[in-house]
Image (tube, grey):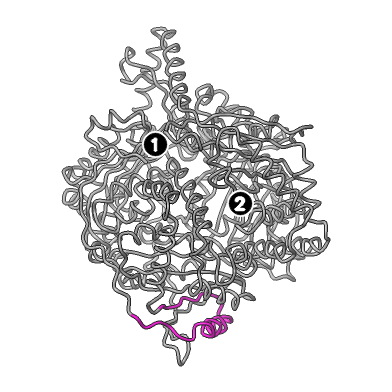
Amino acid sequence: MTASADSVTNTPAHHKSFNYIRSQYVASLNLTVQEFEHKVTGAKHYHLAADNQENVFLVALRTVPQDSRGVAHILEHTALCGSDKYPVRDPFFMMTRRSLNTFMNAFTSSDWTAYPFASMNSKDYNNLLDVYLDAVFFSRLDPLDFAQEGHRLEFETADDPSSKLVYKGVVFNEMKGAMSSVPSQLWQTLTKYLFPNNTYHHNSGGDPEAIPDLTYEQLITFYKTHYHPSNAIFMTYGDKPAAELQEKFETQALCKFERLDKEISVPDEKRYYAPVKVQESYPYTQADAADKHHVVLGWLLGKSTNLQEALQAQLLSSVLMDNSATPLMHALESTELGSSPSPICGLDDSQKELTFICGLEGCQEGSADDVEQLIESTLRKVAEEGIPQEDVESALHQLELHQREVGGDSYPFGLQLIMTALTAATHRGDPVKLLDVDAALDQLREDIKQPNFIKTLIEKWLLNNPHKVQLTLSPNAELQARKEQAELEKLAQIQANLTEEDKQNIVELAQALKKRQDQIDDESILPKVTLSDVPAAEDATTGETTTLAPNNPTPVTRYSAGTNGLVYQQLIYPLPQFSPEQLNVLPLYNTCITELGLGEKDYLNSQRWQASVTGGLSAFSSIRGDVNDPHKLTSYYAYSGKALNRNQAALSDVLKALIETPRFDETGRIAELVSQIRAHREQSVTGSGHSLAMAAASSGICAAANLQHNWSGLAGIKALKQLDDGLRSEGGLEALSNLFTSIHESITASQFQALLIGEQAHLDEMQAQLAARFTSNAQTPATGFDLGKQVRQVNDAWLTDSQVNFCSKAYATVPMDHPDAAALVVLAGVMRNSFLHKAIREQGGAYGGGASQDSTIGAFRFYSYRDPRLEETLADFDRSVEWAITENHDRQKVEEAILGTIGSLDRSESPAGKAKRCFYQELHGRPPEVRQRFRERILAVEASDLRRVAELYLKPDNAHIAVVTDFSKKDKMEAAGLTIQTL
């Protein structure tokens, strides 16, 4: 229960094994932070006591690797493969399907490893706590799990020593995929030089070239010193009392340990006396390499554990780079030296010492010094001329809004708060200060009144700071081939030196691992929830529908929600029919309209206006297939914004200007934005390859799926590149501007409806402010958006620069309200849990793989993620279908898939996020009764239903195939009968 402001002087109840340190009420978050320390081991416990039934747990260990062999990352994986109390092969993944968790995962950062989960069910929370505590502190660390999750040598034909030797391992392949991403390579290369002496110099996830050098013995040694309660931080959130949690910590783990006579910490980096300039390369084999150089500058600043320095750095970063009107961002966006700001621009506060980074991508060779001159001249100008006071106030406004907003739509709000505080806790700072920043913000408001405040920060941390690195990352067409050849030569040398005994050991390891993967563990030793623990209905919220004013019939839907001082407004229009040209550029319109000028304000002044009174604007289409026919669409377009309560009237003013006076005449700005969008989308391929492959495979199933592929998928990236290139031709920009104008006029010609979300006391005022600005509403009915029925066969291979593959198969199925939809959803869970996880991840070595039923488009989709295989994975998809049809599915496996499905339906949400979800579900013909019917069908699925729908819908001849792979696989893909597609 949340303490009141007067109660923080009272000692909260706690277990006798813990010392109480302090409590602090955080008014802006409506919670109390309680700090405790375990008497024997010194383990810290921070409890965020809040009136919220979604309880969160996290235990973090300081993990400080001294090389790039990936020991912390591989240990994170291996620790979850069985423990003393739960000696089964895969308790973590088993619990994901025996639980109603709202979040469950594990993270490896650069200097900590964390194991978090969340649940709204008390029984489930305690079950997960049992498993997590045992996994972290009493892990078995079987050598076979190290071989599976980390790395191993294996013959291409596992039992044939004459076949080629290869590396295998989940983390090995995961990091090959991760390091195919150019932003990841940029970040890792820059930190290597910014931190020449401490742990941040190394790749904590593991460098694929170094991972095979890690030994099992090194893993065990690291575990014994780092996975100890004396090196642990427990962080919890919710309405469970600290004493109850500490009872479990003590009896299930801590009572078995003594204090460790070793302190794990990160030393301060030794500072440079002069700036450093470096150049490295990244793999890039496409023809446009001339302007694909990256140039970034990085500075090492103050301590992230020092709240004053951290907030000052956040403020400085914000006033320099928060939006297009800030001076440094404006310089980077408008220069001809590059195509767009670097994807790693900004302040990083996730490590012990802060870093500030800025630069450009899309540069020409030899432009590094010019880029540095641009950045430094901009900084000097700001230092000399200062920042307008209103812009500094806007930056503070954004910090306050960020502090107050209740998140929880991506992962639980309590976990977001814990992650905010974790860096300070890791480095033995004060995590409470990072949660309760109101007093520090007040001090900043006083500080910025000093005329030289910003100038002093710029001079201290940037202009006069010798610990600066200039990095150029250049494309190299031969680099990837050289790396692959080096790996092959290393393996060939190892194989040449193998004795007969060595060869037999490798064969026996592969046999032992397969036997372990195939064994059936006794899952009954793991705790679980059952279907009787599942809520009968979803936790929905209901809005109130009225009209904007007595003389204005505009529909308004209002939701009362605990938004902690924020308001959310949306104006929603029916989506009109578009021409093909309009439809193709609608995603660009979505992004550009909120970044352009409004009325008499150019885009710079418009950005300043938005930053001063709102938490941001967005514009988006909302298109879904009908619950009974995926070829029939319901389609809307929304203009959305949020603000603090005190700025609700100003938010309405901004939205009115956005609707009535957008500046599509700013063609130069449009060109900048398109270039930036292109750069971002091009960099996203290897990070989202599985999603892109699924979208491509599904694109032949219905119009909505094809639209997704053409807008946000691989086809969309290809079209965007062509459009961006075309803007350089005469009339190209004017044509795009005219398309934007016509799109806007078509959308806003019809009547809108409004969505208002806020605290009950503010809803009437929100509505009045909106009504005062929109005294009339167009009555022209929109021509209904319709794409007709679009069906085609897909067999595509998309080529890019990647060390790993992403595979997908898709089948046309049924929409949400069809009686078979529920069985298909559960079937996907059973196939993922009981077949695909073992075949694709454990045996195939991919980082992930599975299946899902998307009832919005009526498609069943298989996928693999960061996968070393291609044809074998596609064959495994087929084998899983055969298995689903012939297997006598165990009732327990069906129930586990049902639990997982319900868990995904009842996911974590913020109060505002829940209101938005319920509103749009109603808007798209998914009222509570339809959702409840679907829920009841899920709960009623039987094993026989799975075999029936698998045989009915997953016919081999009906499969659509898409893969994302490297250019080097072109011939192999053509031989497999796939059509080659390039970005």
Q: Quadrant of residue 186?
A: top right
Q: Position of residue 40 (x, y in %)?
A: 71, 42
Q: At 72% from the left edge and 55% from the top edge, which residue is drawn?
A: 311
Q: Is 734 displayed left or right of 68 in the figure?
A: left
Task: Tell me the magenta residue range.
Answer: 752-780
Q: Is 145 displayed left or right of 948 in the figure?
A: right
Residue designated by label 2: 419
Q: Nearer the viewer, residue 519 or 629?
A: 629
Q: Residues within 10 Å of mark 1 (few under 14, many from 20)?
A: many
Q: Quadrant of residue 818?
A: bottom left
Q: Reply above or below: 917 against 480.
A: below
Q: Reply above or below: 641 against 903.
A: below
Earlier-in-chain disc, 2 versus 1? 2
Q: At 47% from the left edge and 85% from the top edge, which residue is drawn?
A: 548
Residue designated by label 1: 800
Q: Nearer the viewer, residue 407 or 331?
A: 331
